[in-house]
Amino acid sequence: MFYRLSGIHHTRYETARRLWPIPADRRQIWFLLVLGLVAPFLFSNFHLTSYIMPWLILSAAALSLTLLMGIAGQLHFGFASVMAIGAYTSIHLTRAGLPLELALLGAGLASAVIGSIFGAAALRVKGLYLVMATLAMQYLVDWTIINVPVISGGAQATLQTPATSFLFVALKSDMARYYLALLWVVFVTLLILNIKRTSIGRALVAVRDKDYAAAVIGVNVVRYKLVAFFTSSFLGGVTGAILAFCYYQAVTPEQFNFNISVQLVAMVLVGGLGSVLGAYLGAGFVLLVPILLTNIVIALAGMGWLDVSTNLLAHIPLMIYGALIIGFLLFEPLGLGKIYDNIRNYLLVWPFRHSKL
Amino acid sequence: MMRQNVKKLSLGAALLAGVMAFGVAQAKDPIKFAAPLDYTAVYTFLTNEYAQGQKDYITMINEAGGIDGHKIEYASSDTGNQPQRGIEAYNRAQRDGAILFDFLSTPVARAMVNRALDDKVVMITAFHGRGDASDGETFPYIFPVMSTYWSQAATLIDYMENHEGGLKGKKVAHVYIDSPFGREPIPVLEKLASKLDFTLRTFPYASPGNEQSSTWSEVRRFRPDQVIIWGAGGGQAVSVREAIRNGIAPDKIHSVVWLAEADMEAVGKDTAKGIRKFEGTDNGVNSALIKELTAKVIDTGKGSGPKENVGRSYYNIGVATMAVSVEAARLAMKEFGPPLDGDKLRKGFEMIQDYDANGLLPKLSFTGKDHQGGGFGRVASWDGDKWVPLNDWSNPYQDIVWESIAHDAAAFKEGR
């Protein structure tokens, strides 16, 4: 079958320690990468701009938060404000004449610095108390953006992304914007995958699992918590900038409010804490399922199968969506990524029954 | 599924009969309007009535054969007040050929302005969205259609000045929800304060407005002669209740358009007697258009919602938005012929002159420059059972309003 292990021999540590040691995994990854590259030619512009591109960008956001919540175990309920800082910083920097490449870096750094300041609360509090600290960040950032006209864009509270280019390619077409988003999400994916198998990643996992024990064996808990907040906020800030330039093209405070923070946490939880694949699945679930359910319900109503008021029509998708979340978490508490992992483990030793992997 | 098959069979039979009877018959392409509204998040306080009004009006038009035989297809869905869902709904509807959009959500409408301008489709933003879209030269495809918040503020102040003893030397409190919406009329109010020599002070309360006690304590200490409340949804009833509790008489309270029968019921119908609000459409069922709608759609059982909603404030606003849009489509069809597209529809809007929707609206006129329709409005008072207009339609201080419009439109050109 797809995941045969027989015939695979590693004669060097390098081959055993690769990101994807099994040829079947590598083939899948190459397939997905090629699919991503040719998506503008395979899918209509509607599907590209309304489904695929926001899915990719929100996957990058979920991956950024996965680093903090899943790998390092630090809760963050204000991550949309981190993205907001990145989005607004990048727009103001490009309006000031900076090229987008540097503006993205500036966006990441601004988010990282401010995110780390609030993340410093993690040095003294855990769990729900840390939730309160990051919630405070959300509301403080929201308040600042709304009440400082020079940041928000004045009375209309809208900032448009200026015309700009990335690596000499003008971001004028949907295809160009899509490829920038794809480039970023690939980078974040590889980064998170590699962090998980480096000493930094192992230290973060130790901090997550038992910070006292980690301290005893020599891990500098303070430093690694700050590293987690800094890195995660940097990635989140750049993702916010990508979201602004590639997708929204005009930012308003409502695009980064508390609801978005909750959705980001939902993406990470539903997809699976610490799972890279889970971040993609969680982002797809949270972004696409409400839209698809809405469209399905409307189609059913259009065919005469659902003769109810428009108001109820709008609420039915919410009911189904809530039931789906509960259903998936009951079915697999470790998230959507774990479902894939279970299938994969089963196939690895098929037709034999048990797996030790 | 059976209904669908019967529909297709009937349509096929009708087309066949048409071809046989007349030799050559062309099917009249439908005109597509899209209304992805917010049914589940922020604007829930009005969406149901508003959408019901829109659909009922379109039903009436379609029952009469449409515009020159072209029926109107109205597509509605839920955006949850989220820009990304608005983007998806917009792209889907635009792909299907929709030429007019109504999002009834300021966050979604603002996010969609550039797309509508690039794609050359009309977006109506009655009482929401960007107020500076009244500048038709900067926003050729965006139509606020009715008074902006700036015009509403000017109308309220004008009423106080001319019908409530004048404002010179008086104190006016502007109590608003702490959001861009709540803050939007402040520039106009400040200019009017200088012009009319009254003292303006602003009092924000935190969104969503469930808790306003501390704000109204401050207002009480300020001892205002007049109060303007600027909120939406549940916060409005809280504002009214707190104002009355803090000793402000109902007839000193003046509200933005978002104050309706449901809020009066929440406060207590008799308690709220005397409250004033801006209104941009006639209220109740007395206008000829609502009477016609009642006779042709409601009483014949073709209405799309509860009968009790007919004539309520938000229902009438919904009817009015579609009345103006259909009038624009009619004018465009007459001038340019089928098939309609966004550009023709835009010109149709700009051809509207002195249109009052059979008494439902003040006389609206649009030009290539003015997409607000003139900024008309009036003040209505709650009499314990319904809203009663207190003055005639007027559009005061439009010079000051257009200063704000021009200022923000220029800012839009700079990217804000």
Image: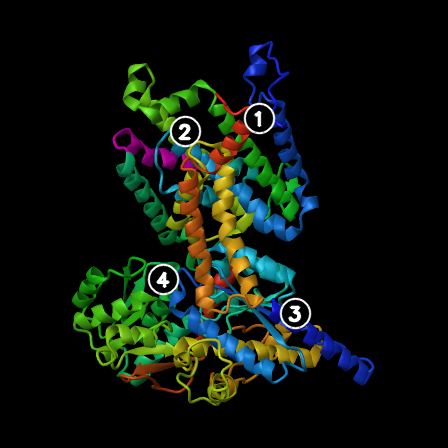
State the residue position of label 2: A71
Q: Residue under mark 3: which chain is it in?
A: B
User: At label 1, which amino acid type do we have?
Assistant: Trp
Q: Are marks 1 and 4 on the same chain?
A: no
* Label 1 Cα crowd, 10 Å radius (few <14 / some 14-19 / many 20+): some
Q: Is mark 4 on a helix, strand or loop?
A: helix
Q: Are marks 3 and 2 on the same chain?
A: no
State the residue position of label 4: B183
Residue farthest to the top, as pictured: A11
Distance (Cα) linking label 1 and label 3: 48 Å
Its colouring scheme is: rainbow
Q: Which of marks 3 and 2 is in front?
A: 3
Q: What element carries label 1?
A: loop
**Quadrant of the image for the N terminus of chain B?**
bottom right
Q: Residue under mark 4: which chain is it in?
A: B
* Label 3 Cα crowd, 10 Å radius (few <14 / some 14-19 / many 20+): few
x and y, in percent, of residue B337 in the image: 72, 77
- Tags 4 and 3 touching, CB below 8 Å: no
Q: Which of marks 4 and 3 is nearer the N terminus?
A: 3
Q: Residue B5 carries which label?
A: 3
* Label 2 Cα crowd, 10 Å radius (few <14 / some 14-19 / many 20+): many
Q: Residue at x 62, y 40 (%)?
A: A179
Q: Is residue A240 above or below residue B272?
A: above
User: At label 2, which amino acid type do we have?
Assistant: Ile
Residue farthest to the right, as pictured: B23
Q: Which of marks 1 and 4 is in front?
A: 1
State the residue position of label 1: A350
Q: Which of marks 1 and 3 is in front?
A: 1
Q: Earlier in the sequence, mark 2 or mark 1?
A: 2
Distance (Cα) linking label 4 and label 3: 53 Å
Distance (Cα) linking label 2 and label 1: 31 Å
